Image (cartoon, rainbow, N blue to C red):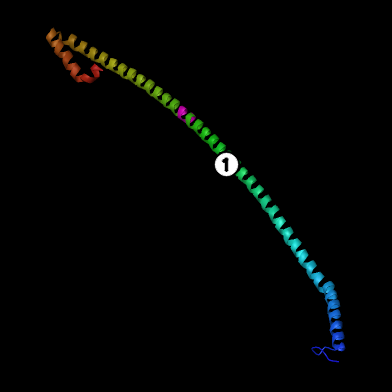
Amino acid sequence: MERLFDLDFQLLHDATLLAVAVLFLGIILSYLLFNPVRDFMQERQNRIAGDIASAKSDKEEAQQLKAQYEEKLKEVDKEADAILAEARKKALQNETNIINEAKEEAARIIKNAEEQAVLEQKRVADEVKQQMIAVAALMAQKVVAQNIDTTLQDSLVEETLKEMGGSTWQS
């Protein structure tokens, strides 16, 4: 019998057995190796998908928190502006109160100074009157003592006025 490509029954039998063995080995390896790898890859894929979903939800949550914090910051800014406005208002009130108190104190001081000036003027006027009385008494003594005429009396008045000082007499 002539063989085609040197194929004999034994070779075909070995080749068939080898093919069946490889098929069974592939099936066994599929259950032993490929399925755990497929399961591992599926778990990894599911875990990655879960991580992506978790990351998306975390991102959305972070955006919501960011929006809340921005809103709170706006509210804090508004509160700070309100507090500053209140502080400015109180400062203006205090400034007005201090100015009014200072004006009142200045008015009291001016009033006291005016009263003291009036009292000092009265005291000076009393002193001038006393001096005038003393001068008039002195003049009367001189006039009586010398029994003089009117020209001499006028000259005595002029002399007395010069002794007293013109500014005292005129004020």
x, y (%) of residue 50? Answer: 74, 58
Instruction: Give the x, y percent position of residue 159.
Output: 16, 17
Could you say which quadrant of the image residue 16 lies in?
A: bottom right
Q: Does the magenta stretch include residue 98?
A: yes
Q: Residue at x 72, y 59 (%)?
A: 51
For the record, the magenta segment spans 97-101
In the drawing, does residue 73 fall left or right of residue 8?
A: left
Sort mark 1 into few (<14), some (14-19) or many (20+) by Cα contacts within 10 Å.
few
Residue ranking furthest to the bottom: 1
In the image, 162: left or right of 67? left
- Looking at numbered disc 1 in the image, what kind of residue is underneath it? Asp
Residue 56 image-quadrant placement: bottom right
Nearer to me, 29 or 3: 3
Magenta: predominant secondary structure element?
helix
Q: Answer yes or no: is residue 108 visible.
A: yes
Question: Residue at point 58% right, 39% down?
Answer: 78
Residue 4 in the figure: left or right of residue 166: right
Q: Residue 124 at what x, y percent from top left?
A: 31, 19
The one of 17 and 153 positioned closer to us in this rendering = 17
Residue lying at 82% horizontally and 70% vertically, measured from the top left: 35
Q: Quadrant of the N terminus?
A: bottom right
Q: Quadrant of the C terminus?
A: top left
Which residue does the numbered mark 1 point to in the structure image? 77
* Up-down relation of residue 59 to residue 162 (above or below): below
Can the viewer see residue 164 in this picture? no
At x 34%, y 17%, the residue is 122
Question: Is 159 a magenta residue?
Answer: no
- Residue 92: percent from the left, percent from the top? 49, 32
